[in-house]
Amino acid sequence: MDKQRMKLSCLILTTLVLVSVSGCAGLAFVADFIEGDKAPAVYEPEPKTTLVMLDDPFKVIPNSQIGRTITSNVEYHMQKNMVDAVKEKNSKIKDPEKHELHIELVPSDKIFALQDEMGKDFDKMPIDKIGKRMGADQVVYVSVQSFQTHYAVNVFKPKATVEVKVIDSKTGKRLFPEGKVVVDTSITPPGYMLDVDLPYKGTNFEGPSEELQLRRLLAEKIGLEVARMFYKHQKPQPGETLPG
């Protein structure tokens, strides 16, 4: 029996014992125990229309498909955990006034279409202007600072660094991270820096396909880790590389 199953079995047994002995108090204890195993959100955005936007200022992303994989995965995990999960929770509450508010995401294919339409001019457009054009109240802006797969000859170590900001589309103000006082207004304060990596992997000499797969996996994990900044989530288990 693996550690996850053993942990679950112990939790179920504990729940049965506590409920039989102390009723609702036992259930509350178990709920607190499960909740305590979760990591808090770094930032909880306002429940408004939200656009996910990716930028590659240093041209480190291998190709546009990898960039779109990152964007789509940020959107997927935010939709699953911040929209669908809340809707499901609300469906069990009869009183509409007690329903929890949630964000609404602008579909990523809309910004992909705008990028294709504008070409190189897209990069010159301010973040808040893009947000307005997409009908978003706020923009989750993800700037890829580095993206690499190789560590040494015949050794892969996929890793990346991204900078994350949340921008108000109406005012252009940065909502997250909260801006510090800047003496030199020509300097843009840095956003939230996030390092993402995958385990070391020796090459199997499978040719380009092996590196392509690792690029995709890294892109998917970047998307996941960026999304998880905005909601409470299960802490990764030891040895876990790409949690769902």
Image (cartoon, rainbow, N blue to C red):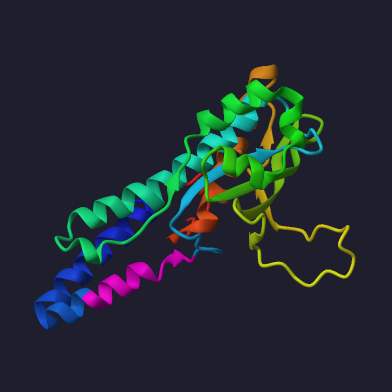
**Front-most of 205 and 196?**
196
Q: Percent from the top left, x then y, of residue 225?
A: 56, 50
Q: Main secondary structure of the magenta part?
A: helix
Q: Quadrant of the C terminus?
A: top left
Left or right side of 110 for 98: left
Left or right side of 160 for 216: left
Residue 239: in magenta span = no
Q: Percent from the top left, x then y, of residue 38?
A: 43, 64
**Residue range highlighted in magenta:** 28-40
Residue 34: in magenta span = yes
**Front-most of 229 and 14?**
229
What residue appears at the point 71 percent right and 67 percent down from the top-left corner?
179
**Front-most of 141 and 224?**
141
Relative to 231, is 140 above or below? above
Relative to 153, is 190 above or below? below
- The quarter holding residue 126 reads top right
Would residue 214 be visible to someone looking at this image?
Answer: no
